[in-house]
Image (cartoon, helix red, strand yellow):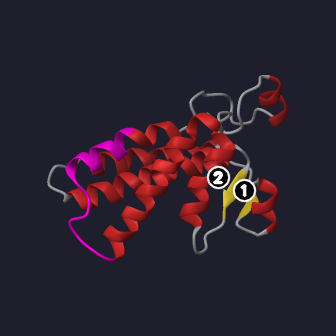
Amino acid sequence: MSWTKLLASKEAQRHKTSKKELDNMRALIARDLADAAIAGLSADRRFATAYNAALQAANMAIACAGYRIMSKVGHHRVSLESTKLVLRKPAHKYADYFETCRRKRNTIDYTFSNVATETGAKEIRRGQRILQPGRRLDHKESRRTRENRRLPLGVGCQ
């Protein structure tokens, strides 16, 4: 997978993010993590809600890299895979983990109930933090400046 292939297949498009968009994404992530911690919800719903926070964190990293994944069949999978392009090797195992979570979330939302465990619901809430940009820079900082600092794309957002 490469950005060139994703752009050519129309699974992604170039995108210029803004501080407002990133703040909105942060608010979604915070809301979903708070909701996923509500004790009265089923483990399934807590898991699915925490998964959505992880997906939003992935989308935020992708936006910081200058792209947006197009909404079509398989776009969650593409978002999670694309984090490997953005966050590079250190995030690969986490992207693979969230791909497994994506499949579990599909089962929870479309097929069966009582799939997730309390442990799984807690684990995904902790794990989603890896997909968030780890270093806060000015969101307007140029791609060239990030490359000159040898920072991976995706960590250039505020």
Answer whether labels 2 and 1 touch (C-beta < 8 Å).
yes
> To which residue does mark 2 refer?
82
Which corner quadrant holds the N terminus? Answer: bottom right
Residue 119 lies in magenta, yes or no? Answer: yes
User: What type is the residue that disc 2 sits on?
Assistant: Ser
Q: Which residues are magenta?
A: 111-126
- Secondary structure of the residue carrying numbered label 2: helix
User: What type is the residue that disc 1 sits on?
Assistant: Met
Residue shown at the point (30%, 45%) measured from the top left: 34
Residue shown at the point (71%, 44%) measured from the top left: 65
Residue shown at the point (75%, 69%) measured from the top left: 10
The disc placed on residue 1 is: 1
Left or right: 150 with respect to 30? right
Which corner quadrant holds the C terminus? Answer: top right
Left or right: 24 with respect to 127? right
Q: Earlier in the sequence, mark 2 or mark 1?
A: 1
